[in-house]
Amino acid sequence: MHIPENYLSPSTCAVAGLAMAPVLVRAVAKVREEVPREKMPLLGVAAAFCFLSMMFNIPLPGGTTGHAVCGTLIAILFGPWAAVLAVSIALAIQAVLFGDGGILALGANCFNMAFVLPFVGYAIYDLIRRRVDGERGELLGAAVGSYVGLNCAALLTAIEFGIQPLLFHDAAGNALYCPYPLQVAIPAMMLGHLTVAGLAEAGFTVGILAFVRHAAPSFGIERPANAREAGVVPIAGLILALVAATPLGLLATGDAWGEWATEDLVEMVGYAPVGLANGWEWSSLMPDYSLAGMPEWAAYVLSAVIGVALLVIIFRLMGAAARPTVDFGPKQGA
């Protein structure tokens, strides 16, 4: 679902970036207001669940691949505005360090996966949780909400792809950027997400949420009484297990829909879209989570470690920079 570099026109990227900017400003303000400073590192851990879930590529119908995002999971644990910030930072790390998603397309990717996905997912989760009591209601809401949230993000991505040949083409009618129109992009994108990827999103969300609720009941907005209650040890164990398992994501062959190299597009559509072929490229440090001279699986694990460490460090620094909560105690005469 990551939109690569040059698949969207610069003007489309600019519009998406401008739309996302006030959302991020609002998200930062809401996180400062709602998330206690001592919980900020835990929000970084929740962001790590998102980063790691996106490394588990799974085969989709049509020979492409997809992945979960876990944006609804973060929204359930810390609120949808915290999810906006957490997923956006995870996407930025992926784009800058690993070339997963375009730098120019970062605004569009954040709008789809960091804004629409968690807000839609959380709204449905909350609706179901209020009508079905207990743990069953929470897990059912998480499953349905995450499934619908992911597919809403996939639909937006397909629309953004599909409007490119309609709006940006040369005199001969050849697309300058993504060459697939809406009638191709929407069915192709939604087939894989309505079936396999949506179920994977629900599975990741429900599985991690159930583990967290039992192993670390106060992992979330609520202030823990101590480190043991916060569940640091079992959560750390789950993160390590996911990091070690990330090479499973290499087993899925093929590219995600809409993430092909230019030479592959030439074979599929018969020409190289000019704007895509001659567009701006970012040289990432570890492109596609690889590193020269290192086995593919080892580089994948190293990438996971780097991503998780950066997210925890970033949110720990944000917590350290936040003003401490001051408790003045009960007022006299109260």
Image: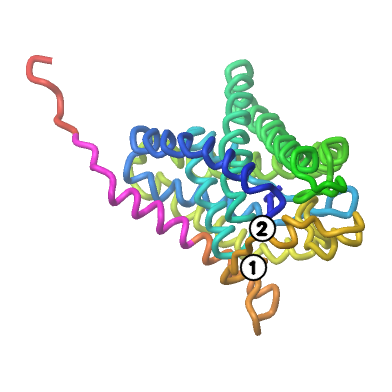
Residue density around tag 1, few if under 14, some if 14–19, many if 20 or more, within 10 Å: many
Camera-near label (2 vs 1) is 1
Q: CA distance from mark 2 to mark 1?
A: 9 Å
Q: Amino acid at mark 2?
A: Met
Q: At 87% from the left edge and 58% from the top edge, which residue is drawn? A: 271
* Residue projecting furthest to the front: 171
Q: Reading the chain from its start, which is encountered first: label 2 or label 1?
A: 2
Q: Position of residue 283 (x, y in %)?
A: 59, 69
Q: At x 77% / y 51%, what residue is drawn?
A: 176
For badge 1, the amino acid type reads Tyr
Q: How many marks?
A: 2
Instruction: Name the image quarter holding residue 138.
Output: top right
At label 2, counting other C-alpha atoms closer than 10 Å, the crowd grade (few under 14, some 14-19, many 20 or more) is: many
Give x and y (percent) for residue 120: 62, 28
Which range of residues does the magenta coloring cover?
309-326
User: Dot 1 corresponds to which residue?
Assistant: 289
Does the CB distance between marks 2 and 1 fall below 8 Å? yes
Image check: 50 left or right of 55? Answer: left
Helix or strand or loop: what does disc 2 sit on? Answer: loop
Residue positioned 58% across, 49% down in the render: 106
Image location (x, y in percent) of residue 215: 52, 45
Decide which of 295, 227 is in the foreground and name it.
295
In the image, is residue 309 above or below residue 39?
A: below
Per the image, the residue denoted by label 2 is 55
